[in-house]
Amino acid sequence: MASSGFEQKKLASSRHYPSHSFAPSAPTLPPEPYEKQQQQETETYPYNHHGSPPSHGHYGQHPPSSYGQNGFPAGTNPYVVRAFEMVDRDRSGFIDENELQQALSSGYERFNIRTIRLLMFLFKNPHDSLRIGPREFAALWSCLGHWRAIFERFDRDRSGKIDLMELRDALFSLGYAIPPSVLQVIISKYDNGSGRRVELNFDSFVECGMIVKGLTEKFKEKDPMYTGSATLTYDSFMSIVIPFLVAYD
Amino acid sequence: MASSGFEQKKLASSRHYPSHSFAPSAPTLPPEPYEKQQQQETETYPYNHHGSPPSHGHYGQHPPSSYGQNGFPAGTNPYVVRAFEMVDRDRSGFIDENELQQALSSGYERFNIRTIRLLMFLFKNPHDSLRIGPREFAALWSCLGHWRAIFERFDRDRSGKIDLMELRDALFSLGYAIPPSVLQVIISKYDNGSGRRVELNFDSFVECGMIVKGLTEKFKEKDPMYTGSATLTYDSFMSIVIPFLVAYD
């Protein structure tokens, strides 16, 4: 288990969330050495409480760049392109949740279909239904590379799993100060009733991280000045929360 | 499909949610004739935007009343007691989600385990984990009786299913004015991709209704004056939403 360098008081602060979207930079796969990932990740996730303007875009809406003939951003690692094309057998340029599960498993472990659905929900074009294209796929792949680096950094005993305190520290390092009671609720999801300490593999870590990130980004849209509070109408509250519940089904 | 008597404008209003909890009165089962249910339900769910103080309690926390030796509120229909005792084979006084699924199927249809989990989450004692006792079971049973009456009232063509507009009218009659875009998202959950109009059976109706009711009650706690807006800290936002996501897993 990791010892924590953060004070409980800090964790209770609600002004601590980052402004970075997971826009793809250079894709990180095939998996790179730990040191390189760590360095890259440190550059990608600065603590940024009050700095640059928050990115409000949907996960899949990264800054425009040039696109190749196959629809991928210029410079996309051919490995990523191949992973996509392998499963897009009808060459439609889009893949569904089962194909996504299969495509990602060439670079990562096989994710639970629940995690896949959540990723689809967060990355797909909001106007498209239940499928993603090359651009979103590249962004997702790159994002998972970042989460992998975080996972490895905070899995300090290299057990391949992270526990509650490591999860807390990992999320905190990304700027998410989650109340301890909420963290307990999140992690209870993975409690198999054996009485043993709950630990998350990478799949579950991504699931937790994406829930936290997704909800935080939505909240931030309502709190552009980073005050830690937001005034929501009933309509906007329901409009934020219900899609998460439905996506997560 | 039901024709709607409500204006779109009214539906867009966010000040329209009820203050009633689903505290058990006389249990409604074995199923009663439609007319009687309808009358009872009309008494139970007045439109109440600004009137009596909102009930902030957890679903299972209904007003205290006297309890029999078996832990059920005095006057509980013996049919309900029997349904509980049939599945509580070890006489522990508590039942888990699978037992609840079985117990409810003696009076209602067999609910999807997802609906059952949501019901457990909403009705269980917040300090207890993953099980409910006689008191919560009686409240849940009674609540389902109310939802059944609503379902039958708004299933105007008696098809055994309700569609989007009927769902909207049903929720509106309970005081929940859900934005049309959110209703669309909710109902998309039940779209099997056949291209046919989506219709909900009672199970799915209860699931939708409980999500709406559960989230609305949480929102109301932050909006005690019924202004239609609430200021939430990041912590309280996450504390409200994450348990729903986890319960719903």
Image (cartoon, coloured by chain):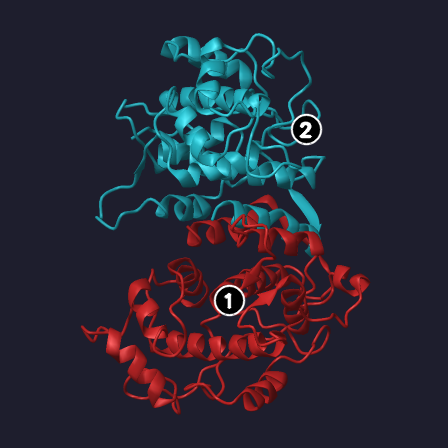
Chain colours: A red, B cyan
Tag 1 and tag 2, C-beta contact below 8 Å = no
Mark toward the viewer: 1 or 2:
1
Residue, disc 2: B54
A22 over B17 or under it: above or below: below
The percent position of residue A102, horizontal first and vertical second, equals 31, 70
B65 over A71 or under it: above or below: above
Q: Is residue B233 visible?
A: no
The percent position of residue B94, horizontal first and vertical second, equals 55, 28
Q: In the rendered structure, which amino acid carries the disc numbered 2? A: Pro
Residue, disc 1: A201
Identify the residue at horizontal 34%, vertical 67% (top origin): A101
Considering the numbered disc 2 on the image, is that residue within a helix, a strand or a loop?
A: loop
The percent position of residue A195, horizontal first and vertical second, equals 59, 50
Quarter of the figure with residue A1: bottom right
- Tell which of A161 and A63 is nearer to you: A161
- Tell which of A196 and B49 is nearer to you: A196
What is the crowding at mark 2: few (fewer than 14 residues within 10 Å), some, or many (at least 20)?
Answer: many
Pinpoint the chain carrying mark 2: B
Judge left or right: residue B5 versus residue A19.
Answer: left
